[in-house]
Amino acid sequence: MKYAHVLIAMLILALLATSGQAETIILKGERRVVGDVLKSDEEFVIVDLGCAVLRLPRAQVVSIDDASPATKPTAASRPADEEGQGDWQLYRTTALTPTTIEANAQRFGEAVVMVTSPAGQGSGFVITPDGYCVTNYHVIARETRIKVTVFRRTEVGYEQKHYKQVKIVALNPFVDLALLKIQAEGETFKYAYLGQTTELKVGQDVFAIGNPLGLTRTVSQGIVSTTNRNFEGQLYVQTTTAINPGNSGGPLFNLKGEVIGVTSMGYLFLGGLNFAIPVDVVKRFIMNRDAFAYDEDNPNSGYRYLQPAGRTDITAPPKGRIPRI
């Protein structure tokens, strides 16, 4: 009898320990399971119910939502596509089902922001509820005074809120990415989920949200022209989605509402030739942000090219010879 009481007490403690960080797993047919997600991959979602462990087929899972916004990021949010653990705290991934562009724009439109500096204006998107943002490096290059405008939906339309306290967290000019942090303690922001480049298909429908030429919250639609276009040594997602000055740094979404690229550049006067930085590059940049950390005391990028050593032999090199077979 004594051991039974101990067992019941341990079970109650286990339930209390897991209830504070439970997730809601929505299954097909509107069924729901609430528990602590222990593991999530392409085949199964492992859920701790407190008194038992349940293995759910991934094909039956519609979405995984954190039941408490104040808890830590869920285990399902960890990027299962990355090798090793990775730093999953600065972006989210989840299982979403495809829907219309209209529905996705309503759901994730508030995560898209306008990034402004004395040199110009571009776009960006929030990746965490506490205000971390991704944009292009060239949007804020050589600037320190940055303003982020968030568009919050109200009953009468969208309301603009400007944040002038913006911290530069990391810069990588080689892949044209920058990581920012809105300094707004206590505020919660709408954020976007990151997808996977490996799931992209040629001909797939995609859409972008940004601020071309200052025209805020502009939505444009297109398809993926190719998933790995080489341009000056970097790989890009080529798309027919319209990208204009001011779109730079904004998200390129798939029909699930996942960000699959960062809109970066396009050919003016040549429609349908536009490019986005693949989301896998964005993930690696975020995970390795310490390597690209911004130093406010030394705003330079910290790299310089060394000239190769001069020739020590001033005589002419020997002429080449055709080898004999």
Image (spheres, grey):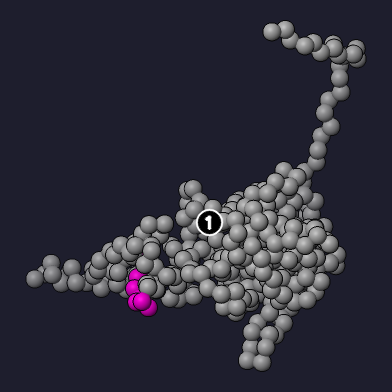
Residue pointed to by mark 1: 199
* Residue 191 sits in quarter: bottom right
Residue 228 lies in the magenta-colored region = no
How far across and down, in percent of the image, does residue 255 sit? 56, 68
Residue extent of the magenta highlight: 29-38
Can you say whether 179 is above or below 12 in the image? above
Q: In which quarter of the image is residue 251?
A: bottom right
Circle 1: residue type: Glu
Where residue 25 appears, x then y in whole percent?
39, 71
Task: Indicate the quadrant where residue 35 lies.
Answer: bottom left
Q: What kind of element bears circle 1?
A: helix
Depth check, front residue: 179 or 300? 179
Q: Residue at x 36, y 76 (%)?
A: 29
Instruction: Note whether residue 176 is visible.
Output: yes
Question: Neighbour class for label 1 at 10 Å: few (<14), some, many (≥20)?
Answer: few
**Which is nearer the eye, 14 or 200?**
200
Q: Which corner quadrant holds the N terminus?
A: bottom left
Q: Quadrant of the C terminus?
A: top right
Viewer-nearest residue: 38 or 321: 321
Q: Which residue lies furthest to the left in this view?
A: 1
Residue 2 pos. (x, y %): 11, 69
Question: Camera-side residue: 69 or 298?
Answer: 69
Q: Which residue is drawn at 70% across and 62% down?
A: 240
Viewed as shown, does residue 154 lie left or right of 165? Answer: left
**Lateral position of residue 190 relative to residue 33, left or right:** right
Q: For the point 25% across and 68% down, which residue is it?
A: 51
The answer to whether any part of residue 116 appears in the image is no
Give the dominant element type of the magenta stretch: helix, strand or loop: strand
- Expressed as whole percent of the image width and height from the top left, the position of residue 55 reads 30, 62
Residue drawn at 52 percent across, 58 percent down: 88
